Image: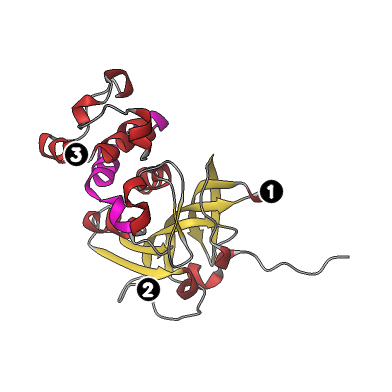
Amino acid sequence: MSQTAERFPDVTSAQDIPANHLSPAADPLDAAEAANLTTNVARRAMIDSQLRTSGVNAPFALKRMAAVAREDHVPARWRANAYIDRAIALDGGGQIAAPLFYGMMLEEADPREGEVVLIVDAGSGYLPALVEPMVATMSVITAEKALQQTDEPSVPGAAATLLLIDGAVEHIPASLAARLADDARVVTGMVGRGGITRLAIGRKAGADVALLPLKDMGIPRLAAFDVAKGWSF
């Protein structure tokens, strides 16, 4: 049973969701966007009960989350529950994070049309689908590709001005930082002390990227970005 069905067993359309479940603020979706969601109650509930109640209210972020079919980015066995508020395992071994991670990431990143965007994808393709219509130039690489040393920019002819990482990392490796322009912005998940994962933002300064944690939240860990552990006695 889907999360929406569990909470609202009598729901058959978006209009049937209890009024006290909706944000009192004006609906950020236009009439056409809202009408499109009347056939996808789970996506409508994701907007209202997961994103808006957690502070994701930027219209552009909600519009993108409303437009992209998350069910197309999960294994077939998970399609009916694609909008649950937790990560879902992918067939290739990665995970797609909970919707809140992507909503907050979009809001923090605020991608602009003129930016050169680099995305480290965890295998679902969901984050690239959210971002692509917002920018003119975007490149997508895997975590394994990000670890490879290169003298060429990830986006032909330009270093990235915005890096988005679909997962939590212990650090930004030099091989990935080298693909970024000076002062490039970064939005990612971050693995902190004790394995606590947080949403984080950062900027490239010199050859390094400094991250600032913003909010504790469950984010799938990208083990490829773990710091090598040395011997200790």
Look at mark 3 in the image and give the residue it sits on.
37
Asked if residue 53 lies in the magenta stretch, the reply is: yes
Which residues make up the magenta segment? Answer: 52-73
User: How would you rate the neighbour count of disc 3 (Cα within 10 Å): few for under 14, some for 14-19, many for 20 or more?
Assistant: some
In primary-sequence order, the first of circles 2 and 1 is 2
User: How would you rate the neighbour count of disc 2 (Cα within 10 Å): few for under 14, some for 14-19, many for 20 or more?
Assistant: many
Q: Are marks 2 and 1 in contact (CB under 8 Å)?
A: no
Look at the numbered disc 1 and give the secondary structure of its residue. helix
In primary-sequence order, the first of circles 3 and 2 is 3
- Residue 230 vs 34, above or below: the answer is below
Amino acid bearing label 1: Gly
The number of callouts visible is 3
Look at the numbered disc 3 and give the secondary structure of its residue. helix
Residue lying furthest right: 233
Q: Residue at point 81% right, 69% down?
A: 231
Look at mark 2 in the image and give the residue it sits on.
154
The disc label shown at residue 161, or none: none
- Comparing 212 with 81, the one in front is 81
Look at the numbered disc 2 and give the secondary structure of its residue. loop
Which image quarter is the C terminus in? bottom right
Front label number (2 vs 1): 1
